């Protein structure tokens, strides 16, 4: 089944390109032309039924959409609270929700006559998705990745190369995701005429947070309908993990006007009382980074602080501006989940349901497991399982060895 | 506009030389001496860069300078206070603070303008605050007699150019090439038609920056612009001599070396 296009008329954004006081376009003048051109190109595209048809067709034929919703009976019974349902974005081609956005933006790039695509990546998931669609559309692709992350994520680096992409290690700054974002924007400024930048999350200067949200909202649009069909009603609450926040925005957007509580789980790392976390909304303050005004981790002078999380996909010092807006307005609630809580949730889901979630997604699940305890079995919650965990087995192995070692000593 | 900006920039007839250095690179004392040296080498104004952890518009040379300066904890407020010390040591040319938006946001604009007044600062340039995002700041700058320097690029449309130039203050900074700051050997051929487009809609002096490092480039610009900005070419000289500049014993010989290199390569005022 090809779903009806549902992208149009969803600009919840004012004429200054802001969500409340958040968002905007804090970029050098050299990029303004490209951002204005992109905004117009996107508006034209999503008002063109043939563009939307192709987007949905590719996601259907190539990525296997719609992804199912799975009822976790054993997990729900064990917790003894509300019934937990998972939106299975892990079953997408390339193993995560990132492909939804990569397909949309690559189609847009082709429509706008761009010849090459560039992308940034942290753990490598968005890099792999970008390299995949680049191969599919026959476009050359460069993926910027922090030099430290290139070391840490050797497998994904190899996957990207196998898909024909060039991986550019970024040595500036600390050699992590935030520096990869800076570098991809710098490269774009120099090559703006024939190159499209595929932003991986609902972050960056306008119109990116809007574009990524609208290419990810298929997650929530599908899930909302599936829950009504399956359970006969809307879920009482919806949960997702939040780094930049693309899977969460994709899920939340469909439920914003419904009586559904929205919860975002940010990375609490080793605890929000330590310096090692990525809990932007819990511990951050309002500032400007990567072209947007949002909450971010910074020192008193405005220098950006390097975040930490066991999950490379949540290891980001800022957060999408629309999440900052939803948090301030109280429409969505964001809480930090520690490394340990996420790993526990990952193990639980693997053992009880035979589903190995990505460490990122395990943060959303862990928050849902906390909240459902106090709910009753007639209630339902929906969790966005944004990706599969095969990429994380090495990390999890180390954690379990450490835990066992601790006990042995 | 301050009287200094008017005298050294606005009424200037010769080709203006506007150098850029990073505050605190390699330390505070060296920054003061570098400013004085650059004035003696013929600078018409000084761009003082504030180091930032995530400098989006800068290439590797200025990124490294930022890193060196941040190692000693340089901040926007401290950098502004350095200008006062430069003035106490005899600096006369206007000083433009070059800072990324987040540093300004965290200091607060009220504090910024108060410090600007107390420390005799003349201009402000925020590279990641395009026209659309800088309306309120431009108004306050105007009221406070601080020139908010606007950037325009070859990709800026005629309509934007008109809007930006009609409200520009001090001078207009023309980005010579796409991309980030950093030394380039030659200009993109499109730069001259671009400068003509700016000239048509702009009453203020126009200065060209990004990638300028040689006498040949300056000569090429002479009939198209009123000034040129040199950043990375100077900052890389500073980087090569960071240790000597940090040490009071070797500082003066390092300063002299940099001055000689600049005078030779850029056709600026002969060595005093």
Image (spheres, rainbow, N blue to C red):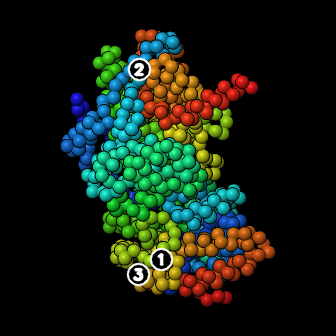
Q: Residue pushed farthest right?
A: B249
Q: Residue at x 23, y 32 (%)?
A: A2
Which structural element holds mark 1? loop
- Do dots 3 and 2 share one subunit? no
Q: Is residue A193 left or right of residue B139?
A: left
For image coordinates 50% across by 76% down, the residue present is B212
Apparent side of residue B32 relative to residue A395 in the rendered image (left or right): right
Q: Nearer the viewer, mark 3 or mark 1?
A: 1
Whether residue A161 is visible: yes
Q: Chain of mark 3?
A: B
Q: Nearer the viewer, residue A357 or A272?
A: A357
| Residue behind mark 3 | B224
The answer to whether residue A274 is left or right of residue A364 is right
Relative to A303, residue A49 above or below = above
**Residue B185, label in figure:** 1
- Of all chains, the one bearing label 1 is B
**Which mark is on residue A85?**
2
């Amino acid at each position: 089944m090809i779903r009806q296009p549902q992208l149009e008329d969803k600009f919840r954004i004012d004429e200054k390109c802001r969500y409340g006081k958040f968002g905007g376009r804090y970029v050098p003048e050299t990029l303004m032309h490209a951002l204005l051109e992109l905004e117009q190109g996107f508006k034209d595209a999503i008002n063109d039924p043939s563009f939307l048809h192709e987007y949905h067709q590719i996601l259907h034929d190539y990525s296997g959409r719609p992804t199912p919703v799975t009822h976790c009976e054993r997990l729900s019974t064990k917790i003894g609270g509300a019934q937990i349902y998972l939106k299975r974005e892990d079953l997408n081609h390339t193993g995560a929700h990132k492909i939804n956005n990569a397909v949309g933006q690559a189609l847009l790039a082709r429509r706008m006559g761009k010849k090459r695509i560039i992308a940034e990546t942290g753990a490598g998931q968005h890099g792999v998705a970008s390299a995949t669609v680049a191969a599919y559309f026959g476009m050359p692709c460069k993926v910027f990745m922090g030099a430290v992350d290139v070391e840490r994520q050797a497998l994904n680096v190899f996957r990207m190369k196998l898909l024909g992409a060039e991986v550019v290690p970024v040595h500036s700054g600390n050699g992590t995701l935030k520096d990869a974002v800076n570098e991809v924007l710098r490269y774009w400024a120099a090559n703006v005429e024939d190159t499209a930048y595929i932003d991986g999350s609902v972050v960056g200067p306008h119109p990116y947070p809007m574009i990524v949200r609208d290419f990810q909202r298929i997650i929530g649009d599908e899930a909302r309908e599936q829950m009504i069909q399956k359970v006969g009603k809307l879920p009482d609450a919806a949960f997702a993990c939040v780094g930049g926040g693309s899977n969460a925005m994709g899920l939340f957007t469909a439920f914003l006007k419904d009586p559904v509580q929205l919860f975002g789980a940010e990375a609490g790392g080793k605890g929000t009382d330590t310096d090692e976390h990525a809990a932007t909304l819990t511990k951050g303050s309002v500032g400007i980074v990567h072209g947007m005004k949002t909450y971010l981790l910074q020192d008193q002078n405005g220098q950006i602080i390097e975040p930490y999380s066991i999950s490379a996909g949540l290891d980001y010092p800022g957060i999408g501006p629309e999440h900052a807006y939803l948090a301030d307005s109280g429409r969505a609630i964001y809480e930090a989940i520690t490394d340990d809580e996420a790993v526990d949730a990952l193990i639980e889901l693997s053992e009880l349901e035979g589903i190995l979630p990505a460490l990122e997604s395990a943060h959303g699940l862990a928050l849902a497991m906390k909240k459902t305890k106090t709910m009753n079995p007639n209630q339902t919650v929906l969790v966005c399982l944004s990706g599969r965990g095969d990429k994380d087995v090495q990390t999890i192995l180390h954690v379990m060895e450490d835990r066992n070692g601790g006990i042995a000593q | 506009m301050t009287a200094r900006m008017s005298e050294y920039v606005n009424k200037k007839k010769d080709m203006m030389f506007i150098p850029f250095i990073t505050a605190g690179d390699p330390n505070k004392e060296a920054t003061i001496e570098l400013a004085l040296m650059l004035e003696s080498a013929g600078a018409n104004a000084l761009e003082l860069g504030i180091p930032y952890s995530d400098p989006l518009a800068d290439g590797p040379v200025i990124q490294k300078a930022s890193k060196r300066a941040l190692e000693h904890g340089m901040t926007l407020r401290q950098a502004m206070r350095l200008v006062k010390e430069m003035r106490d040591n005899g600096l006369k040319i206007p000083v433009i603070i070059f800072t990324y938006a987040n540093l300004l946001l965290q200091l607060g604009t009220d504090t910024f303008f108060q410090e600007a007044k107390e420390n005799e600062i003349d201009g402000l340039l925020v590279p990641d605050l395009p026209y659309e995002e800088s309306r309120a700041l431009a108004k306050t700058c105007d009221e406070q007699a601080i020139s908010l320097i606007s950037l325009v690029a070859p990709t800026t449309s005629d309509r934007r150019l008109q809007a930006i130039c009609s409200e520009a203050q001090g001078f207009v900074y023309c980005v010579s090439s796409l991309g980030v700051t950093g030394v380039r050997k030659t200009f993109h051929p499109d730069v001259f038609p671009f400068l003509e487009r700016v000239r048509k809609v702009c009453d203020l002096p126009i200065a060209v920056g990004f990638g300028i490092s040689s006498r040949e480039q300056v000569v090429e610009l002479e009939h198209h612009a009123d000034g040129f900005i040199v950043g990375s070419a100077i900052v890389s000289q500073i980087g090569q001599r960071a240790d000597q500049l940090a040490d009071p014993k070797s500082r003066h010989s390092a300063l002299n070396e940099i001055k000689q290199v600049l005078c030779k390569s850029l056709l600026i005022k002969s060595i005093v």
